[in-house]
Image: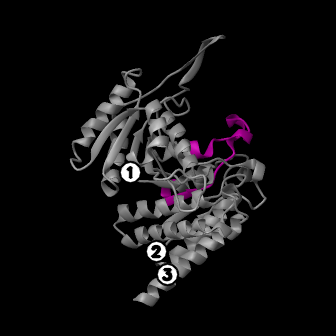
């Protein structure tokens, strides 16, 4: 299988190198047969090719079995007409990555983590209030007069139904509960479609329970009673906000893993920004992208019926947990002194240690 690696901007190359080191070791240990091709996007590409995202890279992404994408610093890009193309946004649209899947859970020893948190946010990724993606042509935000701005929220039955399908499929593999989140008594038509489609899909999964909650009540309940929530099904903007809350509750935004997926494609892309203020200092936490690559392996394993991929994903997650449990190997955002490269090396060492321990017991 061919994996396209796009390091991105700012801390992107640093955390991508750490994640790729873990992925390459797992590839060897579990005989996964992965082949990696690295290409520049973002500022590095702009300097060479005059565009942050050449068409050839999009073609490679469409041809690859999966993509690993580092964070991109879009705010520093030139205007689109001068080559400053939104890298993750364009890849999301071209690959129709309609599902943004973001886990958050508390781990042993992390002082800022809220206990009993273990949820998976399944966020619709192609429409909603986000004006950059909810129109066929043009923007969903516009100004009819100089002192009035309007923003359109787009919710379709098709998009709602397919993201609900993803949520219930994950719930069936987890603790068999879905919380569907909206604000239906206010956004009666759009959230009405979203919740109604979730209810339709729920009938296909009689062993999975569903609860509906308003977004404001959900934010409070996730913080005060996190153990009540397993899979959280949510629209685009609400999901963007709630997933940041959830990962902050897990201990740090540096732990933000994410997978963007469609029926055919998947992209591992950490759920945090490019952090230009700490770029080049070897202090960024690569956990989010490392765990994103584990999610990617799990997704591929389920799609391709290859249990060794899912096994490697579980091993990476366990290795990360072990490294985070040790105060001596935590990164600065978690109160430690370990750098980006050293953290990646520690995860690799833990992978090897765990494999040796298993081998000795066989």
Residue at 43% from the left image edge and 44% from the top image edge: 225
Q: Is residue 105 above or below residue 136?
A: below
The residue carrying mark 1 is 263
The residue lying toward the viewer, choosing from 114 and 84, is 114
Tag 3 secondary structure:
helix
Q: Nearer the viewer, mark 3 or mark 2?
A: 3
Look at the numbered disc 1 and give the secondary structure of its residue: loop
Q: With 226 as the anchor, is 166 left or right in this view? A: left
Foreground: 232 or 322?
322
Residue contact between numbered discs 1 and 2, judged by CB atoms under 8 Å: no
- 10 Å neighbourhood of mark 3: few (<14), some, or many (≥20)? some
Could you tell me how far apart the alpha carbons at marks 3 and 1 are, in whole angstroms?
32 Å
Q: Visible in this render: residue 233? A: yes
Residue 308 marker? none
Quadrant placement of the C terminus: bottom left
Q: Is residue 122 above or below residue 69?
A: above
Dots 3, 2 in contact, CB < 8 A: no
Q: Does label 3 or label 1 sit earlier along the sequence?
A: 1
Q: Which residues are magenta?
A: 62-89
Residue named by callout 2: 32
Which residue does the numbered mark 3 point to in the structure image? 355
Estimate the x, y position of residue 280 in percent, counting from the top left: 78, 58
SS assignment at label 2: loop
């Amino acid at each position: 299988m061919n994996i396209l690696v796009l390091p991105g901007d700012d801390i992107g190359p640093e955390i991508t190198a750490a994640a790729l080191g873990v992925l390459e070791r797992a590839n060897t240990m579990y005989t996964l047969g992965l082949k990696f091709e690295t290409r520049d996007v973002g500022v590095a590409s702009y300097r060479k090719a005059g565009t942050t995202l050449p068409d050839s890279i999009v073609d490679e992404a469409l041809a690859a079995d999966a993509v690993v994408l580092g964070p991109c610093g879009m705010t520093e890009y030139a205007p689109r007409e001068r080559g400053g193309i939104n890298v993750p946004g364009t890849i999301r649209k071209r690959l129709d990555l309609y599902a943004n899947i973001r886990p958050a859970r508390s781990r042993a020893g992390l002082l800022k983590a809220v206990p009993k948190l273990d949820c998976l946010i399944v966020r619709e990724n192609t429409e909603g209030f986000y004006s950059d993606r909810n129109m066929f042509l043009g923007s969903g935000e516009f100004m009819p007069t100089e002192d009035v701005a309007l923003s359109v929220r787009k919710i379709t039955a098709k998009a709602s139904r397919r993201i609900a399908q993803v949520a219930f499929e994950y719930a069936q593999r987890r603790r068999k509960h879905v919380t569907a989140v909206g604000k239906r008594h206010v956004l009666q038509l759009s959230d009405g479609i979203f919740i109604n489609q979730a209810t339709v899909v729920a009938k296909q999964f009689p062993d999975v329970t569903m609860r509906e909650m308003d977004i404001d009540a959900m934010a409070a309940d996730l913080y005060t009673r996190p153990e009540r929530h397993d899979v959280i099904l949510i629209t685009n903007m609400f999901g963007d906000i709630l997933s940041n809350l959830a990962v902050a509750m897990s201990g740090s935004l540096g732990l933000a893993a994410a997978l963007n997926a469609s029926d055919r494609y998947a992209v591992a892309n950490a759920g945090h920004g490019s952090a230009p203020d700490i770029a080049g200092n070897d202090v960024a936490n690569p956990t989010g992208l490392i765990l994103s690559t584990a999610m990617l392996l799990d997704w591929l394993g389920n799609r391709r019926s290859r249990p060794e991929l899912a096994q490697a994903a579980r091993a990476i997650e366990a290795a990360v947990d072990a490294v985070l449990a040790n105060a001596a190997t935590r990164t600065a955002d978690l109160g430690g002194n370990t750098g980006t490269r050293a953290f990646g090396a520690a995860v690799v060492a833990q992978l090897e240690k765990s494999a040796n321990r298993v081998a000795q017991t066989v």
